[in-house]
Amino acid sequence: MIHFKTIELSDKPQIDACLDGNTFRACDFSFTNMFAWNAKFKTQYDIQHKTLFLKFQEIDGETYYMMPIGPMPVNESIQILQADAKASNRPFQMKGITAEMWEMINKKMPNQFKYIHERNNDEYIYLSSKLISLSGKKLQSKRNHINRFKIDNPDWQYFPITSKKDLSECVTMLNEWENIKEDKDRSLQYDYIATRLMLEHFDELQLTGGAIRVNGKIIAFTIGEKLTEDTFVVHVEKAFGEINGAYTIINQQFIEHEASKFKYINREEDMGLEPLRKAKLSYQPDILLEEGVLVPC
């Protein structure tokens, strides 16, 4: 019998032990995301036979399971989740299922499930070398934005986030950024909560950060971490949009200084937000990691 419990910061070591060696490039399999977004998703976990089981709740109240991670055979682990759904008197459904996961499940449990693609949850993955060089005609506008930023802000400075003072300044910038946002919908509120948690528990979460300072003030910052051996995930990117090129330069500088050793950069999903989708597509993703829902046939 599985016994799910709410994820706490103190659970990081044992959850990370299960995630160690994970090869799925999906950002869901980051302890930081599980912890920081818990106000929205109410993620819970259990570990059995060194296999990590996860479930979460969407805003509409629907409960979903995630792909189990660990040595337990996939059919056995999914049967455990099915039993939990039955015992809880709710439908069995999984979310965040990539094409790779779907293939694994369907191979072991053929003709039992159907897969429904959810475009809003597809994740954008790029070659780090491309995000650093921004070479080629399709990324010319990005280079132009950076050049304009450097001309407009000759005293600009990139630096890694390493101190409590840096983190405090980022919190100040985040509060200002949130206050000037015109759209105060729930997704923005959850984003603010998640970002604050990452800043407040930066060291405990073992995160990597970088920021841009202009005239002595932080005007952009980014937070990320290792996801797999070849992939780095960017969790947060904040900048004052009224400063031309601020988003572009923090994107480029952060990858160049903090994540260049990784082949791929996962910049997560667009959540169906059209401005965010347009921005992520404009960087010409090398992989659009398809995700969807799995339900019984």
Image: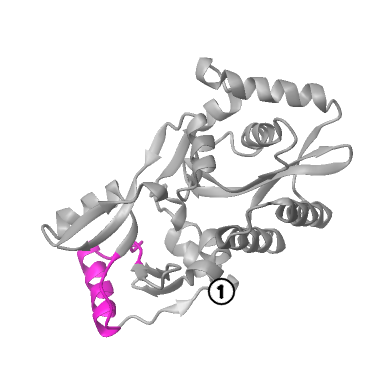
Which one is in front, 14 or 216? 216
| SS of the residue under disc 1 | loop
Image location (x, y in percent) of residue 30: 49, 57
What is the number of callouts on the image? Answer: 1
Asked whether residue 252 is in view, the answer is yes
Asked whether residue 262 is in view, the answer is no
**Quadrant where the C terminus is found in the figure:** bottom left
Q: Which residue is mark 1?
A: 8
Please tell me which residue is depicted at 45% across the width and 68% down the height of the picture.
59
User: How dense is the environment of label 1, judged by Cα within 10 Å: few (below 14), some, or many (20 and up)?
Assistant: some
Please tell me which residue is depicted at 39% across the width and 70% down the height of the picture.
55
Residue 175 lies within the magenta run: no
Disc 1 marks a residue whose amino acid type is Glu
Tell me where residue 254 sits by quadrant. Answer: top right
Which one is in front, 235 or 73? 235
Image location (x, y in percent) of residue 215: 89, 37
> In this view, which residue lies farthest toward the left?
111
In the rendered image of this protein, does residue 285 appear above or below residue 93? above
> In this view, which residue lies farthest toward the front?
182
Image location (x, y in percent) of residue 225: 58, 49
Residue stretch in magenta: 65-93
